Amino acid sequence: MIETDAVILGAGPVGIFQAFQLGLLEISAHIIDALPYPGGQCVELYADKPIYDIPGVPVCTGRELIANLLTQVAPFKPQWHLGQLVSKMEPQPDGRLRVETSGGSRFLTKTLFIAAGVGAFQARLPNVEGLAAHIGRQVQLTPPDADAWAGREVLVLGDTDSALNAAIALATQTTRPKSITLMHRRNVFAAEPATIAAFQALVDADQIRFIAGQLTAMQEADGSISAMHYLDADGKEQKLPVDELLVLLGLSPKLGPIAHWGLEMERRQLKVNTEDFCTDQPGVFAVGDIITYPGKKKLILCGFHETVLAAFGAAAIVFPHKKVLLQYTTTSTRLHSLLGVDSLDSGKKP
């Protein structure tokens, strides 16, 4: 059980900046996210697309914004718990909150910040009954280590650069699978032209098999997947021997367990007090796209503003007998010390 002052649910830009604002108030934080890396929507949806409305930054990509935020928060050393979903939140008699994750992490925290954006990003799976039970065994959501599937019948699902590149990597590694098949519902891909060309060259060389089809069912033998059934381009039922299935169909956001925590909601968004962005559960704050209030705008810069007030709201809980003053990073020697900045150079490093 990890005892802490703050847990942040969501490692998108608002969640990361929440950790920074808490750090300025000397509140340490643990950050949990369903993705295996920080970034949230910035990385998943517009990693290389330009963003023009971050104050003081005329233009940056989603990936660049996250990199800068990670550099900014680094002095406060937040603890990361990635690739995990928060599965449980329960208020405790002493006012703290018990938080548990799908990865087995357990926390007793004085405050919880929900910065989950539009929800936790989870892998899309084909609509095949019983398939989810094989995740982590014969069904993988990320490419395996090199040579892990040597001599195996491999089926890759997807049409993006990730899917095509995974098939290409399997076909060009030293020890190849017995067969490599990539399946998508049609022969049109959402990948870069160079990736498609490299993939097609391997298909033409009979190194990769492409099937235009859609999975309908799986066949098991002794509790293991032995084959997948699918409809081909002509609508005919076919069967394909499969030992390993790599699912790269993208990610979709899901609100998940948050919807069942008893917090006041409106249209699947959390209602907050805009004075400190606390929910109707003491100690539970919410910021960013997951919240609603009169005039709410779903912009990153609005989320940044919300984290400041939420941090001060949390400080009243973490330090109940301490008067928390507003300090400025340009002049406060205490903040310079926390940030690892030499006060003599504060004019250069606000």
Image (cartoon, grey):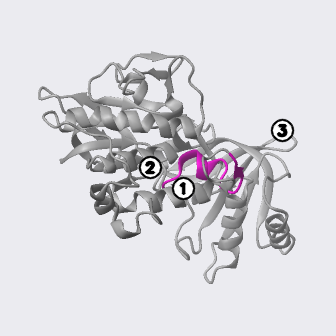
Tags 2 and 1 touching, CB below 8 Å: yes
Estimate the x, y position of residue 267 in percent, counting from the top left.
54, 17
Left or right relative to 224: residue 312:
left
Residue where numbered disc 2 is placed: 16
Residue 214 seen from this side: yes
Please tell me the numbered disc located at residue 81. none
Provide the residue designation for mark 3. Answer: 235
Farthest bottom residue? 174
Name the residue: 39% across, 27% down: 277
Mark 1: which amino acid?
Ile
Q: Is residue 347 left or right of residue 220?
A: left
Tell me which amino acid carries mark 3.
Answer: Gly
Where residue 317 sits, quadrant-wise, is top left
In this picture, which residue range is highlighted in magenta?
Answer: 38-52
Name the element at disc 2: helix
Give residue 66's mark: 1
Q: What is the quadrant of residue 272 in the picture?
A: top left
Tell me if residue 180 comes above or below residue 283 in the rendering.
below
**Mark 2: amino acid:** Ile
Residue toward you, 143 or 120: 120
**Eye-nearest disc, 3 or 1:** 1
- Lateral position of residue 285 relative to residue 14, left or right: left
| Residue at 58 percent of width and 55 percent of height | 65
- Of labels 2 and 3, earlier in sequence is 2
| Percent coordinates x, y for residue 161 in the rendering | 72, 60
Which x, y percent locates residue 12? 50, 46
Closer to the N terminus: mark 3 or mark 1? 1
* Residue nearest the observer in this picture, 62 or 314: 314
